[in-house]
Amino acid sequence: MKKEDSFLSKIGKAFKNIFISLFGFGRHKKQLEEELINKNEEELIENKDLIESEIISPSRQIFRKFIRNRVAIVGLVMFAAVILFVVIGSNTIEFNASYLEPSQRHIEPGFGYTKVPRGLQKEGIKEVDGEYLIGIGTAFTVAISNEDKIYVWGANIDDVKKVPAEVKDRVGDIVQLSVGSRHVVALTNNGELIGWGSNTFHQSQIPVFNPGTDQQQQFKKSVEAYFNPSARTKYPNEVVSKIEEDPIKRVYAGDQFTIVFTENNNIYAWGVVRTKELDNPAKTFNALEVMLRYTEQGGLRWKYSAEDNLAYNLSDRLVLTKEELISELGLVEEDGATLELRYFSDRIQYRNRKTGNEPWENAILKEPETEDDDPEYYGYDFLMQYVDEEVTNAKIVDVHIMFEHVAYELEDNRFIIVGVGGLVKEDYPRILSQTAEERGYRIEKIFASSKNGFYIDENGGIVGWGEISSENRLNTVDDVFEDKKIIDGAGGMYHITLLEDNGTVHVMGFKNTLGHLNMPDDIKPSKKVIANFFNSIAIENDGTIRAWGNKGYLFGTDQVGADVYKRIVAGGSMTLSVAAVAVVVSLIIGLTVGLIAGFYGKWLDNVLMRFGEIISAFPFLPLAMTLSSIVHNASSINERERVFMIMFILGILSWPGLARLVRGQILAEREKDYILAAKALGVKERHIIIRHILPNVVNVVIVNTTLSYAGALLTESGLSFLGFGVMYPQPSWGNMLTGAQSMTTLKNYWWLWIIPAFFIIATALSVNLIGDGLREAMDPKSSER
């Protein structure tokens, strides 16, 4: 603080200034003028606030006070950032609430899935016997370099990036590498199988039969006996061959399963053998349908399982079509119905389906001769008489992984396709069942996407089959590349990557949700293409590795594979909108009731306030949950209407507080002189309320509404979290937190609850900070505190 001059010094300065002003010149007079100017400026600064308060409007005073409140400005910036994030995000993304991609489930936040490590680019990918040691999983890639280093990049699914030390120590011994959806298996030069990654079904290790849980997977006994000598004494009847006598020739990793192909043409497969349809959990399939095993003499043995529909596969695939089988059984399809068949080890059942509730009937081969006898049914023995003996004596010479299917290649170039249900298996070209001699050419490679299968013949032709729709035109691949010679190909979830004989790389597909069709334009002639799920790789002739496809997820993915970032954006729009509409409804009702009750008073005031107290007497959250549940169970209301009803429910239940606050302000204002003067002048009551009283209580209303918005946002989030607000699949920040009810999610998938919780807390906190800042800025006595 500046020290004040003494009385004598002031007198001395005054005389000095008078003398200089009268007789001074040069620098002395200029110095005096500068001192006077500085003094006037200091006085002006000291009185600035007082001067401004005298000349600026009340609204400007409020604005100046608000922007000087640093805490309020922080809240305003936070809220503006959230709004911009939601608005910009909503206009830049394509969002589908029902989108699901199970293969991408529970992937942690991260990018760089298509960024090939520099070390691998420099060292090059190792090639053994014409095969590159590289593979693509659901969202990661594994490769071994020429320097015997292992590289894993992309998402760390099931700790696949944490390569075990024993694998790192033996990288130089690996001669085969196969990457499945969530695991990796490799074969060393001494015939040892090693693996890592997902091991839920023992797919990345040698399986062990568990009598308690593996009753539906008896084939594990044979697999375990092949690897483990001690298991051969436990399961002597299940021993097909021994690894020391019949070493591993090839290893394959698929979608949660592993296949071993031995030198003596035996096949061992284990891992996921059952999977559920998402839209029909009661319907299950066997992932491999049948375990094809070969004796040392090469005879094919089919292991029958009643649940595998093996009879259908034998009849439809190898000899009889479904129509021929129906004819053999003497069945007739009724008008307006679909004739369905199902198969068991001892019988075949049929029904003419119209509604789906029709009972199944047994197809009878021979009626009983007496009442005590049972009829003979068409069963396994009946179908086996149609099995081609040449097929049962053929040998398998190769295995082709077809995404969710497997194609076994016989020595005469015929193919047997097994796997989950779908058109890839059911509508495959019958030419695949012919020998190379019969068709006049060899088929060199078979691969598949999730919906379609493809084969490349020795002449460079490519043929596709499977699903065809307005979106999916992969079946027309033979027309698209009719004049080109294709020498290699690989399939992803919804796309295929092809290589011409001149090195040109092509990509074809649909549903470009993750960029799997965004192949770089500057790819040079290449010698190899690899693809799986949503990523592709081309190895150029000079060894450069080019990758494209799924680049990663900013906020990770949820339990169905949906992008959490997109759901946060869409959920933010929903949560902010629900809270805003609820506050507007509450504002309209509360302000109207408060103005009327406060101005008119008497019995009307008493009735309105008692009604508000009745609503307030009900527990808010249970009442909101009950009303929301009633709305959700109303079959005549669609999802959009349900959301709007929830908005109105929140608004209708939260108006009494604002009404009481406005009423109190009106009671104080209506007795003031300017109101009495307006009444004396004959101004209509509605004009007095709207033009005179309302402007004087609007500050209180604004502050209360701002703070109520944060409360409405938290209430909506709470209701949605409990399952009574916005319902899945429509996202809101509240229902995105539902996964936090699971300890598995809390421990392993932190991004599924921390990210939506952060947005809820940040938004509610920012709105509260803004509300507190407005309250202080609008309070004329705040500067005195």
Image (spheres, rainbow, N blue to C red):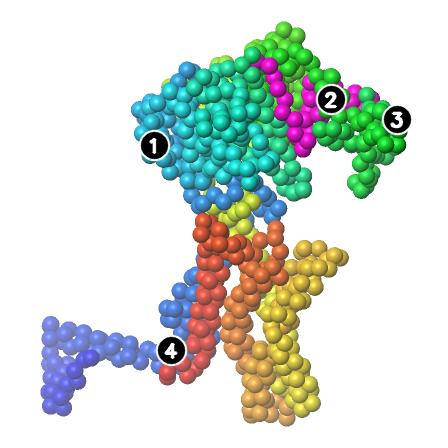
Q: Residues within 10 Å of mark 1 (few under 14, many from 20)?
A: few
Q: Secondary structure at mark 4?
A: helix
| For marks 2 and 3 on the same chain, the one whose residue lies earlier in the sequence | 3
Q: Residue at x 55, y 91 (%)?
A: 672
Mark 3 lies on residue:
369
What numbered label is drawn on residue 381? 2
Q: Is residue 207 above or below residue 676?
A: above
Mark 3 touching mark 1, by CB under 8 A? no
Q: Quadrant of residue 33?
A: bottom left
Q: What secondary structure is the magenta-colored segment mainly?
A: helix
**Magenta region, residue range:** 298-327
Q: Residue at x 40, y 24 (%)?
A: 192
Spot occupied by residue 626 in the image (x, y as percentages of width and height): 66, 67
Numbered-mark total: 4
Mark 1 lies on residue:
166
Mark 3 touching mark 4, by CB under 8 A? no
Quadrant assignment for the C terminus: bottom left
Could you give the CA–CA distance between mark 3 and mark 1, rounded to whole angstroms?
68 Å
- The answer, for residue 496, to whether it is visible in the render is no
Residue 322 is a magenta residue: yes
Q: Amino acid at mark 2?
A: Asp
Mark 2 touching mark 1, by CB under 8 A? no
Q: Is residue 58 above or below residue 271?
A: below
